[in-house]
Image (cartoon, grey):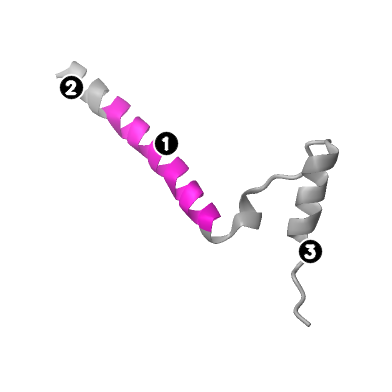
Amino acid sequence: MWQDIIIWLIIATAVFFIGRRLYKQWRAAFSPGASITCGCGCAGCDSICDSRKQPETRN
């Protein structure tokens, strides 16, 4: 009995974390700038973050 409950809790926890990761990836696909965390300290990362933060202007 207890073994079944523990197994279901482990499965539910794994499904929760996998689902949360898939949801974050799905959400990031629709808004790429939202998933990037800036401030890594390297010049390449900062330039990527700066270009994503600035809205695009159309002439």
How packed mark 2 is, by other alpha carbons closer than 10 Å (few <14, some 14-19, many 20 or more), is few
Which residue range is magenta in the image?
A: 9-29
Residue that numbered label 2 is attached to: 4
Kind of residue at badge 1: Phe
Furthest-top residue in view? Answer: 3
Q: In the rendered picture of this protein, how many numbered marks are placed on residues? A: 3
User: What kind of secondary structure does the magenta stretch mostly adopt?
Assistant: helix
Tag 1 secondary structure:
helix
Give the quadrant of residue 54.
Answer: bottom right
Q: Is residue 32 magenta?
A: no
Kind of residue at badge 3: Gln
- Please tell me which residue is depicted at 31% across the width and 25% down the height of the picture: 10
Whichever of callouts 2 and 1 sits on the residue coming sooner in the sequence is: 2
Please indicate whether residue 8 sits to the left or right of residue 32 in the image. left
For marks 2 and 3, give the CA distance.
Answer: 52 Å
Whichever of callouts 3 and 1 sits on the residue coming sooner in the sequence is: 1
Query: What x and y, as percent, mark residue 17?
Result: 42, 36
Kind of residue at badge 2: Asp
Whichever of callouts 2 and 3 sits on the residue coming sooner in the sequence is: 2
- Please tell me which residue is depicted at 76% across the width and 51% down the height of the picture: 49
Residue that numbered label 1 is attached to: 17
How packed mark 3 is, by other alpha carbons closer than 10 Å (few <14, some 14-19, many 20 or more), is few
Tag 2 secondary structure:
helix
Q: Is residue 53 above or below residue 22?
A: below
For marks 3 and 1, give the CA distance.
Answer: 32 Å
Residue that numbered label 3 is attached to: 54
